[in-house]
Amino acid sequence: MRIELATIQDVPELLDLQHKAFGSLCEELDWNDAPPLTETLEHVREEFAQCTTLKVLNDEGRIIGSVYGSVTDGSLYIGRLMVLPEYQQQSIGKQLFREIQRLLPHHRAWLCTCKQVRPPYEFYLREGFRPYKDEIVGPGLTWVYMEK
C-alpha cells in the first residue's frame, strides 16, 4: 500500500469509495440525505479543485482510502477521511489523517463529523481533536465541529 496525491482522473473512483465507505453508516442512522451519499460527480470535481486530496492504493492499484484538506489563513480543514470497509481497522485512516496534517502547513486543524457515529468521533478524540461546536442536522443527528 502507498499514499499518493490524487488526480482529477481519480474523482469517479473517489466518489465510489465515498459511497462505499459511508453508505452503511448513513443507512444505520436513517440519514438518507447525508452529504456523502447525495453529492454529485460535478460537486466532487469542484471540491477536488479547491483541495489537496490524498489516496491510498492497494497492491493492485485500487484506491482503498482517501482524505482531503485545504488551508485558509493557517487553518487546515480536513474532510472526508474514508477507507473501504474491508480495509478498516488496519491503521490506513490513521496514516492518511496524519499525512494530510504533515503535508499541509497549518496553525490549527479542524473537521466535522457526526457525533452519533462513534468510531470516527472517538478516533478524532484520540488524535487530539476536541469539540468546539455542535449543530443538529436531523432527528437524533448532531454534526460536531472539532479542532486541534
Image (spheres, rainbow, N blue to C red):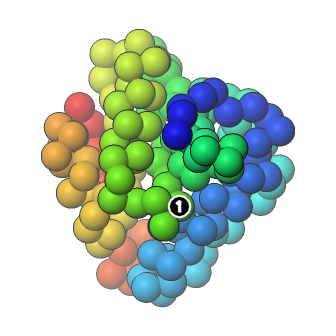
**Residue in the image at 41% along x and 46% along y:** 92
Left/right placement of residue 26 relative to residue 20 reads left
Q: Secondary structure at mark 1?
A: loop
Left/right placement of residue 22 relative to residue 106 reads right
Residue 61 visible to the viewer = yes
Up-down: is 80 above or below 115? Answer: above
Left/right placement of residue 146 relative to residue 29 reads left
**Residue in the image at 56% along x and 74% along y:** 23
Q: Nearer the viewer, residue 49 or 102?
A: 102
Left/right placement of residue 94 relative to residue 77 reads left
Q: Nearer the viewer, residue 116 or 22?
A: 22
10 Å crowding of disc 1: few (<14), some (14-19), many (20+): some
Up-down: is 93 above or below 116? Answer: above
Up-down: is 133 above or below 87? Answer: above
**Residue in the image at 46% along x and 18% along y:** 104
Up-down: is 148 above or below 67? Answer: above
**Residue in the image at 26% along x and 67% along y:** 118
**Residue marked by disc 1:** 84
- Residue reaching furthest to the front: 59
The part of the image, by quadrant, that contains residue 138 is bottom left
Residue 146 in picture, x, y percent from top left: 28, 44
